[in-house]
Amino acid sequence: DQIKAAFDTFDKDSSGILRMNEFQGMLKVVMRLSSDCDLPISRVQRLWREIDTDNSGEACFEEFLRWWISRKETLIPYDHFYKNVRCLRSQQYDPAAYAPAA
């Protein structure tokens, strides 16, 4: 199964579980972050709380699978996110509603 293979790829020590640092590495790959860029730690911790449902400090494959199925569509790559952000310098603004007072 592709999901299990992906889990095993991110399980760097082949322990059968993900730790937060391995999870953080997985997020960087899935979200296509450059090597010199990091997600805010608050966001990583929030996502980690979602996956580590038993608060063990580790995520087994079953926890990962449930989380991945519910979350995979929301983990958009950052490059895609920034393409959708409008560039305010190139925008045409609406004219003023009222003529300036003379």
Image (spheres, rainbow, N blue to C red):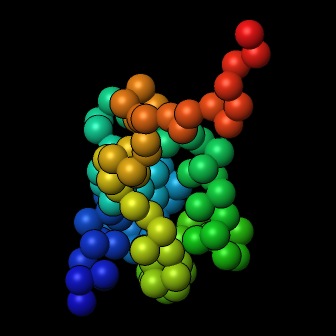
Please give the count of numbered marks on the rendered protein: 0
Q: Which of these two is toward me, 51 or 43?
A: 43
Hey, which residue is sitting farthest bottom in the picture? 1
- Choose top left, top right, bottom left or bottom right for residue 9: bottom left
Q: Is residue 12 left or right of residue 44?
A: left
From the viewer's perspective, is residue 44 above or below residue 5? above
Depth check: 76 or 60 in front?
A: 76
Spot occupied by residue 54 in the image (x, y as percentages of width and height): 70, 76
* Residue 24 % position (x, y): 45, 51
Examine the rendering and report whether any part of residue 78 can be seen.
Answer: no
- 1 sits left or right of 86 in the view: left
Q: State whether residue 47 is above or below residue 41.
A: below
Q: Is residue 76 visible?
A: yes
> Compared to 75, does 4 lie above or below?
below
Place of residue 68 in the rendered image (x, y in percent of width and height, measured from the top left): 45, 77
Q: Residue furthest top?
A: 102
Residue shown at 68% from the left, 25% from the top: 99
x 29%, y 38%: residue: 34
Residue at the far front in the pictured view: 102
Measuring 33% from the left and 53% from the top, which residue is drawn there? 80
* 91 relative to 41 in the view: left or right: left
Instruction: Assign the C terminus to one quadrant of the image.
Output: top right
Q: Quadrant of residue 96?
A: top right
Q: Is residue 57 left or right of residue 13?
A: right
Could you tell me which quadrant the N terminus lies in? bottom left
Residue lying at 70% horizontally and 19% vertically, measured from the top left: 100
